[in-house]
Every structure is written in structure tokens, then in C-alpha cells.
Amino acid sequence: MHEAEVVMHNTIYKRYIKLKKSTNENDREIYGFVEDAIVELRCSPVCGKKINNKKCGNILKDYGIANLRVLKLKNGWRLLYSLVSDQRRSIRVIIVFFGTHKEY
């Protein structure tokens, strides 16, 4: 099986880049959490738990996605993502959020 392609929604990508460039120790730690998650998602895109669509209707509408999964990170952080496949059966992981449980 091929590795999945991992991409981020534009707003999340901007936040990710800010963390990457930051010299703040906490920001660097969070960046590491997200980096570890990206590696895991490339190898095993279904590693996160599927979220019931009734619980996440607004997020589905806001991002124009059909499904949502959550991957628990360290220190109470979460990463929300969607899986999309194309006609070639390749899988794309779209990250739409990362933050604490209280933030989503």
C-alpha cells in the first residue's frame, strides 16, 4: 500500500508554519506533536477514531468534507482530519484542525 498524502486546510497550514518558525518552547513542542501525527497518518490514515457526523455537522459544512476523524496527541491535544480517495485509489488526509479538546 502506498503512503497517504497529508495536506492541511489553508488556515491550519498558516498556524502550523507559525509553530514551526516559533522559538517558544511550548510552540515547538506542539509542532513536534503535529509532525509525529503526520508521520503516523501517512502510514496509517485510519489510525484516528471516526467521529459521528451528527456531532460534527458544522465542521463538515465549514470545510466541505464528508467525514471526520480525531487523532489524540500528547498533552490533551487533538488533530481532526478527513479522508478522501480518488479514482486511482490513492488516499489523501486533509487536516482541518489541531488544538485542545476545548478549542473544537
Image (cartoon, rainbow, N blue to C red):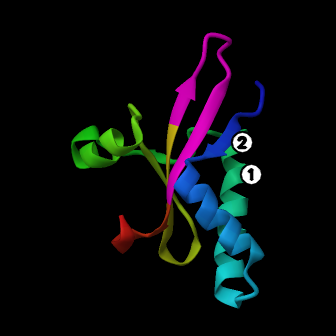
User: Seen from this angle, which residue lies furthest left?
Assistant: 54
Secondary structure beneath label 2: helix
Residue 11 picture location, percent across and down: 53, 56
- Identify which residue, 61 or 69, lies in the foreground: 61
**Direction from residue 38 to residue 66 in the image, left or right:** left
Residue 46 picture location, percent across and down: 56, 38
Secondary structure beneath label 1: helix
Residue type, numbered disc 2 = Arg
Whole-angstrom CA distance, mark 1 to mark 2, is 5 Å
The residue carrying pointer 1 sits among few (fewer than 14), some (14 to 19) or many (20 or more) residues within 10 Å by Cα, namely some
Residue 22 picture location, percent across and down: 73, 81
Q: Specify the segment rendered in magenta.
A: 83-97
Q: Quadrant of the N terminus?
A: top right
The residue carrying pointer 2 sits among few (fewer than 14), some (14 to 19) or many (20 or more) residues within 10 Å by Cα, namely some
Residue at x-position 60% and y-position 38%: 93
Q: Which residue is mark 2?
A: 42
Residue 74 picture location, percent across and down: 58, 72
**Direction from residue 41 to residue 56 in the image, left or right:** left
Q: Is residue 12 magenta?
A: no
User: In terms of secondary structure, what is the magenta stretch mainly?
Assistant: strand
